[in-house]
Image: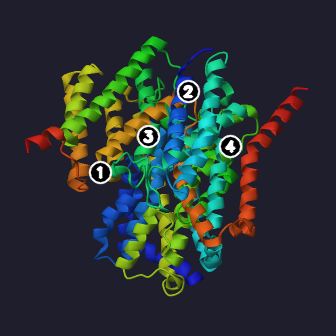
Amino acid sequence: MFDAFVGGLVVVFQWKSFLYLLIGAGIGFWVGILPGLGGATTLALMMPFIYKMTPQEALPFLLGMHSVVQTTGDITSILFGIPGEATTVATIVDGYPMAKKGEAGRAIGAALMSSLIGAVFGAAFLALSIPIVRPLVLAFGSPEMLMVILLGLTCISSLSGRGRRGLLLGLLSGGIGLLCSLVGQDRQAGILRFTFDELYLWNGLPVIPVLVGLFAIPEIVDLAVRGTAIAGDVPSGKLGKGVMQGVRDTFTHFWLTVRCSLIGSLIGILPGLGGGVAQWMSYAHATQSAKTIKEQEGFGQGDIRGVLGPGAANNSKEGAGLIPTVAFGIPASSGMAILLGAFFLLGLVPGPEMLTKHLTLTFSMVWTIVVANILIVLVSLVFINHIAALTTIRGKLLIPFLLLLTFIGAYTSSNHIGDLIAVLVFGCVGYFMVRFSWPRPPFILGFILGELAETYLYVSTSRYGWDWLYRPKVIIIFLLAVAVAAYPFIQRKKLQKGESSHEI
Amino acid sequence: MKFNGGAALSAVFAGISLAVVITAASWPFKTALFPVAIGVPVFFMAVTEFFINLFQKGEGVGDAAGFDFKLSDGDADSRTALRRTLSIFGWIFGFFILILLIGFPMAIPIFFVVFYRGYGKENWKISIGLSAVAWASFYGLFIWLLNVPFREGWILSLLD
């Protein structure tokens, strides 16, 4: 096993493999920065290029690209408030307010370093899981998956505001997200729900236009209303100065970064959930790290921990997502499904052979994730001053470019005019939600998890009747979900108690 | 009692959730279960929020605001802020209509020039220069390199 581990590293540094890794990581860098153009789409676009490659060349090329997309996606989210990737939306919540305060450099530094730690953690998780992967993945049937989704939904309580009204607004927002997830053909009976006779809606509302509209439009409107640059009147020279502070922040909150990486890895290993869930669960976890009420209130207004959590989780899930893909041929996400196609093109069959005969190649994937992320983080850190300076460009000059990125980012989702309509509709919804202080993160959780929850509920009930409710793992995860839902209230009480005892 | 924007938003979502429940009532059990199970509580929560807005003293939701982006208080007074908001929404919808009518490749340079001249009050040099940069980046990346199929717009389709 150790030989294969070292052999994997040697494979990555063979000149041809390394060259392809560099090309892939370079493409991934730009794909991450451009909103909407996701890692999965680009993987699909790159497939024709791998026909003549060997597995030792093709995998560094594809994985090198795919594994850095989330890393640079955070940059767009922080600088412009437009999600670079569907999986980097949570970074906006605290990253963009930091950019507005002139702390773009610090936020990007923290996002990059936490992404790197997350990526290394995910790769280590993949490496360590190889011997025990089989029982780990098979332990999760549809009832357990349903409970994990419930666990994700309970994070709404952490993402809501204070008090009963805060919870009401959070639940309302999550409920509306769930309602939006119901659009499309019902998976059980095939009946069309809320499609208004539009073929475009048969597959449901596409995630990217909804997320881009919900987050980009309110931020663009706000920029226009302010009439300044994103960073206001902060001198451009100061923007990049916080980079090292951001890097240091990652180590100040090292265990938070590690815990969020673990959340990302655990979510990443479960097929179907993906980064959309991991980022918000880790963000919710980050908000729970507040030690005082004042600290807690700082989330959403530029708390560095709100950048570190999602940054780490997004990248750690990539390595973990390879586990079911490589070991069983069960793709954990759409990107992994395309990668699975690449495996077959290269003559590789996922399964036991990948853990025995091709173990060196499997470990080379681990190393590819690590090396590609290190390279991209280093390159980004070198150019961070120039990148952060974009926030000092006058708003009036920037707005058309942001609108162009928003519309094209949405349009490339399904190349349909409906994508643009979805951006406008959800842009207006997002604006009014922000205007009247309805939290958007619970909406996204509901929207992403709604369809999965319904599917797994029916699969569980059809397969096991109601007996699945008594499965030990279901009960354990359910109790965990109850604890996660209740924790913000317990924490609040503790913080209030602590503060009142201090005052005395 | 005061009918404000928050109340209007709650009323809209109460109406939508009610419509969801009524529509789902005619579907088979399995199809209707989720829409009804979600729609009913959303309706009651939206109605509750509606009445809270109606009878609350003061503005906004105060501490109840969740972890999310907040619109800038800014230097602009509320009248200017409203005018700018309506104006930028107008530009956003205008860009969409332009794309719909003449397609992305032609809409991009036209929108950029008109926006910079009309909204940004920039000089011709900057307006045309940045429009050219935007169009070249768009064409080079999405059409030339990635071959993304862009629709040509209603007017051009009619002319064909």
Which image quarter holds the C terminus of chain A? top right
Q: Which mark is residue B56?
A: none
Visual colour scheme: rainbow
Task: Mark 3 or mark 1: name the one nearer the start of the chain.
Answer: 3
| Contact (Cβ within 8 Å) of mark 3 with mark 2 | no
Amino acid type of the residue tagged 2 in the rendering: Phe
Residue A389 in sight in this render: no
State the residue lying farthest toward the bottom. A357
Query: Which residue bears the numbered disc 3?
Result: A82
Q: Of the residues tagged 3 and 2, which is closer to the observer?
A: 2
Q: Position of residue B104 (x, y in %)?
A: 23, 41
Circles 3 and 1, Cβ within 8 Å, touching? The answer is: no
> Pointer 2 and pointer 1: residues touching (CB < 8 Å)?
no
Query: As displayed, is residue A284 above or below residue A273?
Result: above
Residue designated by label 1: A415
**What chain is tagged by disc 4?**
A
Taking A17 as reference, is B112 left or right? Answer: left
Q: Residues within 10 Å of mark 2 (few under 14, many from 20)?
A: many
| Alpha carbons under labels 3 and 4: distance apart | 25 Å
Determine the CA span between mark 2 and mark 1. Answer: 32 Å
Question: To which residue does mark 2 refer?
Answer: A436
Element at badge 4? Answer: helix
Of the image marks 3 and 4, the number of the one nearer the N terminus: 3
Residue for point 72% across, 33% down: A164
Kindly identify which chain the residue marked by label 1 belongs to.
A
User: Which element is circle 2 on?
Assistant: loop
- The residue indicated by pointer 4 is A157
Marks 3 and 2 sit apart, C-alpha to C-alpha, by 20 Å
Looking at the rendering, in which quadrant would you find the N terminus of chain A? bottom right
